[in-house]
Amino acid sequence: MEAAKQQCVCVTGAGGFIASWLVKLLLSRGHYSVRGTLRDPGHDKNAHLKALDGAGERLQLLKADLMDYGSIAAAVTGCHGVFHVASPVPSGRSTNPEAEIIAPAVTGTLNVLKACYEAKVKRVVLVSSITAVANNPNWPTNKVFDEESWSDEEHCRKNEDWYYLSKTMAEREAFAYAAKTGLDIVTVCPSLALGPLMQPTVNSSSKFLLSYLKGERETVENRLRHIVDVRDVAAALLLAYETPEASARYLCVSPPIKVSEMINILKTLYPTYTYPKSFVEVEDNIICSSKKLLNLGWIFRPIEETLKDSIESYRTIGIVN
Ligand SMILES: NC(=O)c1ccc[n+]([C@@H]2O[C@H](COP(=O)([O-])OP(=O)(O)OC[C@H]3O[C@@H](n4cnc5c(N)ncnc54)[C@H](OP(=O)(O)O)[C@@H]3O)[C@@H](O)[C@H]2O)c1
């Protein structure tokens, strides 16, 4: 590829679970030069990025914090497109949710968007979440959730679902900013993402699967779960970026599966782990549709592949035997 055809894009929080796969995908295309922002570029947990094919020539890692506007502005200046992936994803309860979760998500997103607007970035793809969609008590019972539904902020606050609240507020603020300034913003709302870990640390959604292998829970709710492969999320983000007619939000989920069914697949593939022994049926299942994203040409892989590749990566890292 000639240097003149290279296009510069920025990925925030480049060392995270989803962002690492996105960086890999972008580099594999050959015509993107990628700027990845990290809070600590020298940390071992980010070393995998430098080992990616093409990284030597086309990946630049920059130190930036979402709460530091200047660092974000420096990272996006000169970029054609920006993928805003970074956001706190807590795995336990926070003692100070406003400072630890809400502010980096909401103020952080506004900092990224303002910097993109100032830098005349052509399109921003924002990673939102199904948690910004489906926590909506006003949605009709039995109606499949789609892009029209927004999680209810008061409901999230009342239930202290701080992560849900942070994603809902950040995505709403993003569209308000787009309406005010004309900045081209497309959002992608993935469900629970699983798949191989590229980084040596375990992110929150992978902990969910690990908890089923390690005998941490004897009895679990037999919920319908929408699981999506992390590699398919990365592909959805790139599709949203590269498709000129893409607009507004896209739910990014694969078909729902009962937890018991998922455990049965795991047991067949890996019989020796300590799985939950019993299941409690629940009524309030949530069903979401990715029809809009599928119409854009998105494809997702079978759950068996996602589960197998996840566990193989946990074995490689040494998190499970
Ligand atoms: N995994 C899922 O199931 C899932 C589903 C739906 C949506 N999402 C969304 O996808 C995105 C990535 O999630 P993930 O699962 O890949 O989580 P992750 O591995 O924990 O990545 C989160 C990233 O955000 C960065 N970050 C957090 N606070 C920051 C701050 N103040 N300044 C700069 N960077 C900051 C982290 O950087 P450090 O390494 O420096 O901490 C990390 O790189 C998030 O927006 C999340 O809400 C995830």
Image (cartoon, rainbow, N blue to C red):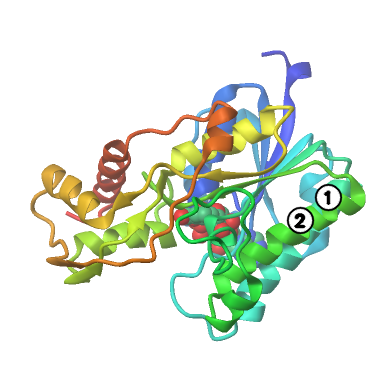
Contact, mark 1 vs mark 2 (Cβ under 8 Å): yes
Would you name the residue on which mark 1 appears? 178
- Residue at the left extreme of this rendering: 272
Q: Is residue 238 above or below residue 73?
A: above
Q: On the rendered image, what quadrant is the N terminus found in?
A: top right
At 48% from the left edge and 61% from the top edge, which residue is drawn? 141
- Residue at the bottom extreme of this rendering: 95
Would you name the residue on which mark 2 appears? 174
At 34% from the left edge and 61% from the top edge, which residue is drawn? 208
Instruction: Out of 250 and 114, give the one closest to the viewer.
Output: 250
Using the numbered discs, state the Cα–Cα distance from disc 1 to disc 2 in whole angstroms.
6 Å
Quarter of the render that holds ligand 1: bottom right
Crowding near the residue tagged with mark 1, few <14, some 14–19, many ≥20 C-alpha atoms within 10 Å? some
- Residue at the top extreme of this rendering: 2
One can see residue 95 in this view: yes
Instruction: Out of 62 and 293, give the one closest to the viewer.
Output: 293
Label 2 CB-ligand 1 distance < 8 A: no
Quick check: 184 left or right of 32?
A: right
Q: Is residue 153 above or below residue 57?
A: below
Crowding near the residue tagged with mark 2, few <14, some 14–19, many ≥20 C-alpha atoms within 10 Å? many
At 60% from the left edge and 28% from the top edge, which residue is drawn? 296
Is label 2 in a helix, a strand or a loop?
helix
Q: Is residue 237 above or below residue 91?
A: above
Quick check: 290 left or right of 111?
A: left
Q: Position of residue 280 (x, y in %)?
A: 22, 69
Amino acid on which the number 2 mark rests in the picture:
Ala
One can see residue 65 in this view: no
Q: Position of residue 161 (x, y in %)?
A: 53, 75
Label 1 CB-ligand 1 distance < 8 A: no
Amino acid on which the number 1 mark rests in the picture:
Ala
Mark seen at residue 118: none
